[in-house]
Image (cartoon, coloured by chain):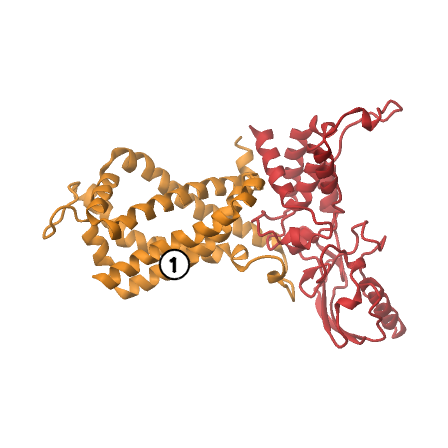
Chain colours: A orange, B red
Amino acid sequence: MGGFFKSSIGRKVAMALSAFFLMFFLLQHLAINILSVANPDLFNEVSHFMGTNPVVQFALQPVLIFAVVFHFVMGFILDIKNRKANGAKYAKNNGAANSTWFSRNMVISGITILAFVLLHFIDFWFPEINTKFIQGDWSGTMPGVDGFRYHEELVHKFMNPARVVAYAVAFVFLGLHLAHGFTSAFQSVGAASLRKKLEKVGIAYSVIVPFGFIFIALYHFFNH
Amino acid sequence: MNLTLKIWRQKDANSKGQMTDYKVSEISEHMSFLEMMDVLNEQIINKGEEPVAFDHDCREGICGMCSMYINGEAHGPDRGVTTCQLHMRMFKDGDTITIEPWKAAAFPVVKDLVVDRSAFDRIQHAGGYISVNTSGNTQDANSIPIAKEAADTAMDAATCIGCGACVATCKNSSAMLFVGAKVSQYALLPQGQVEAADRVKNMVAQMDLEGFGNCTNTGACEVECPKGISLDNIARMNRELMKASI
């Protein structure tokens, strides 16, 4: 099996498996974030559960970090290999005649998403790690805020218009990445018939998930 | 029709190539693209210059020899045809047509529009066959019942002529449509299943060794393939390799 993951196909399968995990993660992330609009108290409760539950923190979170790092690193490795295989460029190449822009430029949407992930880590994840693991504060509270702090922190971040614009642009690229990536992952693991059956689901997913996140950012910007 | 042609000229494998402009006249819309190239070469020879080298053989779309990248597409703008089946009626009088060889690290240019596709031969040699004793005892093919759907799908995969348009089109120069078709045509039939695991492992290993890129599922190869080989074959190859590796 070790030899399998060294082959070109094995690497693609590994990319697809990490993509499945990340797509599931995005869905649950959106579901929780929607609560910040629909029910702030419940959002706080769920955020506190996710932020303090040992299974989430010490089992799922490391898997998530591994999947994110793996997906980016392997994506870049495969892109470099593919560029090497590609040889000289054509004087005239009509890529639009046979494929979509977003399927040919996954690395561009990927790099945009990577930039967003770094911004997102600086905004939320690093402060969270600092509070819990360095300062040792697992209470989920902060001075001046009644109850849990999570909703207040989220709202505060989206008061900055530059951040809202950066998030919105990144999510458009995430949508483009998913528009190809969703069905592509099924094809890579050999599920060609599922790829065809889930084509519309893939389009819906790549529109609903990114625009759901954009809606949340805009909602908090205009309402606070 | 009078046309301007921008053609890749390269003396040999070690020389640097460049695009060169040619004017060609008296082209009938009923000519095939290769016949147009023949007219061009006659005009070039009459001027005492070196004609443009290009691959061709059967000129009826089954040998897989012709291999031109025309106006940014493998085998030109028409669908489901090889360059020899591409008619000049697809172009207009006064058009400028760009003609280049397949470009991929694994398909080095030999001269002008001719590329070395022996990497495909080596992939075939790695497992694209079944081992049958043909010393007079071969049984009748019809003695093994095969479901119609499996036979048809295997036949569809077997229509791959190995022209390399998939590699030329792919932004990653991936050969997975070709290898997927060759793996599938045997994997779908009982005769091929005996050696299926070794076949897919060896052919994929050879494909990687030859320096082809990784498939990113853009689907461009399926669109440009003159034989309409389906992406399903790549998915089947992926399944076959997973099955063989577990």
Task: State the residue at coordinates (69%, 33%).
Answer: B188
Q: Give how far across and how far down residue B12 sits, in percent.
A: 76, 60
Of the 4 image quadrants, the one containing the C terminus of chain B is top right
- Left or right of A168: which side holds A47? left
Query: In the figure, is residue B85 to the left or right of B186?
Result: right
How far across and how far down the image is residue B101, in percent? 72, 60
Residue A180 appears left or right of A135:
right
Give the total number of marks visible in the rendering: 1
Q: Residue at x 75, y 34 (%)?
A: B129
The residue at the far top in this view is B137
Determine if residue B87 is in view. Answer: yes
| Above-or-below relation of A120 to B4 | above
Protein chain holding label 1:
A
Give B99 or A175, whichever is nearer the viewer: A175
Q: Residues within 10 Å of mark 1 (few under 14, many from 20)?
A: many
Query: Which of these two is toward me, A219 or B28?
Result: A219
Q: Which residue is mark 1?
A: A170
Instruction: Confirm whether residue B104 shows in the render.
Output: no
Residue located at (55% from left, 33% from top): A3
Q: Secondary structure at mark 1?
A: helix
Q: Is residue A115 above or below residue A136?
A: below
Residue B245 spot, x, y in % from top left: 57, 30
Quadrant location, the N terminus of chain B: bottom right
Q: Amino acid at mark 1?
A: Ala
Q: Position of residue B17 (x, y in %)?
A: 71, 65
Which quadrant of the structure image shows residue A215? Answer: bottom left
Near-viewer residue (A36 or B181): A36
Q: Nearer the viewer, residue B233 or A138?
A: B233
Query: In the rendered image, which quarter is residue A163 located in?
Result: bottom left
